[in-house]
Amino acid sequence: MSSLSEKNKRFYSWNSAEYWKAVELRRIVLRFPLGKNYVQEDFDAEENELFFGCFSDHEHCLSSISAKKLDATTWKMRQFVVHPSFQKCGIGKEMVTFYEFEARTKGINKIEFHARKTAVKFYQKLGYHLEGEEFLEVGIPHFKMKKTL
Ligand SMILES: CC(C)(COP(=O)(O)OP(=O)(O)OC[C@H]1O[C@@H](n2cnc3c(N)ncnc32)[C@H](O)[C@@H]1OP(=O)(O)O)[C@@H](O)C(=O)NCCC(=O)NCCS
C-alpha cells in the first residue's frame, strides 16, 4: 500500500471505539516490544489531546498520532505509530503532512516531541531538527526534536 485516500485519515475522539483500536496498535508497536504496557493513568492523562488516525476500509487502525497542546502555538507530538505491516510504505509521511496541515489551521506554528533514536532519520527527512543530548525514556534512547511550521 503506497497511498491512502483522504477519507481514511481523520480525527477521532478520546475514549471512542477508534481510540481503543489505536491503543491496541500502540500496545503492539510501542509498548510490548519493551516489555511494558499502558496503565489507566496513561489514558486519563491524554483526555484533552487531539487524536489523528488512519483507518483501513474495514476500520482497522493503520496509524495514529496525538497532539498535546503545550501553549497557544505549540503542539507536542505523541504516540506516533504505523502498523508493522504497513511501515515504510509512506503512511508515516502522509500522517505527518496531515498533522502539520491541521496544526497550521489551528494556529500552531511549532511542533516538538521526544523521538526514539531509531526514528530520528525519518523525522529529519520531514524537516525536524534535533535539540540537545540523547536521553532515556521508557528505557530506550530518545532525542528532543522540533520544527517551526
Ligand atoms: C517511524 C514510523 C512512524 C515511520 O512511519 P513509516 O510509515 O514507516 O514511514 P514512511 O514510509 O512514511 O517513510 C518516509 C521516509 O522515511 C524513511 N524511514 C521510515 N522509517 C525510518 C526509520 N526508522 N529510519 C530511517 N528512515 C526511515 C523511509 O524509508 C522513507 O524514506 P524515503 O522518503 O527516502 O523513501 C514507523 O515506522 C513506526 O511506527 N515505527 C515504529 C514506532 C516508532 O518508532 N514510532 C515513532 C516513535 S518516536
Image: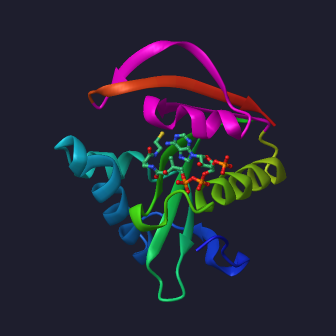
**Which of the 4 quarters of the picture holds residue 88?**
bottom right
**In the displayed structure image, the side of residue 1 where residue 97 appears, left or right:** right
In the current view of this chain or complex, which residue is farthest to the top?
133
Pick the quarter of the image with the C terminus: top right
Q: Which residue is drawn at 48% across and 69% down?
A: 62
* Residue 131 shows in the view: yes
**In the displayed structure image, the side of residue 76 where residue 87 appears, left or right:** left
**In the displayed structure image, the side of residue 61 where residue 50 appears, left or right:** right
**107 versus 137 height, above or below:** below
Residue 131 counted in the magenta span: yes
**146 versus 10 height, above or below:** above
Q: Which residue is drawn at 36% across and 69% down?
A: 20
Q: Which residue is drawn at 22% across and 41% down?
A: 34
* Residue 70 shows in the view: no
Residue 79 counted in the magenta span: no
In the current view of this chain or complex, which residue is farthest to the left?
35
Q: Position of residue 56 (x, y in %)?
A: 52, 81
The residue stretch that appears in magenta: 109-138
